[in-house]
Amino acid sequence: MNIKALTGISAALAAVMLAGCVAPGQQYGGYQQGYQPGYQQGYQQGYQQPQQQGALYGTVQSIEQLNGANNSPNILGTVLGGAAGGLLGNTMGGGRGRTATTIAGAVIGGIAGNRIENSMGEPNVLYRITVRLDDGRVATVTQAPPLRVQQGQRCAVANDTVYPY
């Protein structure tokens, strides 16, 4: 194998590994930033937290932790396993046999990499939160971390999420 091919393969593997380091989704926890006039007014008149429009208010009755299956895509394990299997298969055979072993190695390596990443993945953690609303009804919300409330705490329920109040 010549130096150009090795350099290309090394660059592709480095790009794939770095792509696996990117964290998907919201990174800042959804906190609002900036000045909110309701807080200054509440300070002067005796604190009253502003209510969210469309939210339901109540008290957290119970919190139950649920462990679900890991449903995240296993792209990194598949790609790395396929690349390693392809490289290993390329070292075997000669002529058309080398091409066949390269393809077979890539497929088998991809499957093995996917299975390994599946076994190493952590389960999805969800919380089932039961809230006794101020009007007497009961709301049950299943949400992902971060969990910002505790049992017995006042809360607001909006957009299928429980927030401290």
Image (tube, grey):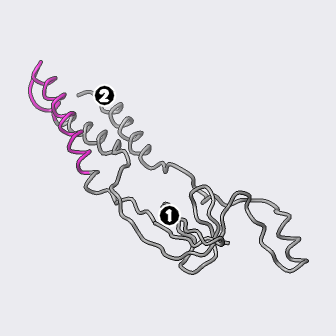
Whole-percent x, y for residue 74 in the image = 33, 45
Residue type at the position of mark 2: Ala
Q: Which residue is mark 2?
A: 5
Camera-nearest residue between 127 and 136: 136
Number of marks in the rendered image: 2
Element under disc 1: loop
Q: Magenta segment range?
A: 89-116
Q: Residue furthest front?
A: 136
Q: Which image quadrant for residue 88?
A: top left
Residue at the location (74% across, 58% down)? 53
Name the quadrant of the C terminus. Answer: bottom right
Crowd class of label 2 (few under 14; some 14 to 19; many from 20; radius 10 Å) = few
Q: Identify the mark at residue 145; answer none if there is no mark.
A: 1
Q: Which image quadrant for residue 37?
A: bottom right
Q: In terms of secondary structure, what is the magenta stretch mainly?
A: helix
Vertical relation: 78 (above or below) 49:
above
Vertical relation: 2 (above or below) 34:
above
Residue type at the position of mark 1: Pro
Whole-percent x, y for residue 107 in the image = 20, 33
Element under disc 2: helix
Vertical relation: 60 (above or below) 81:
below
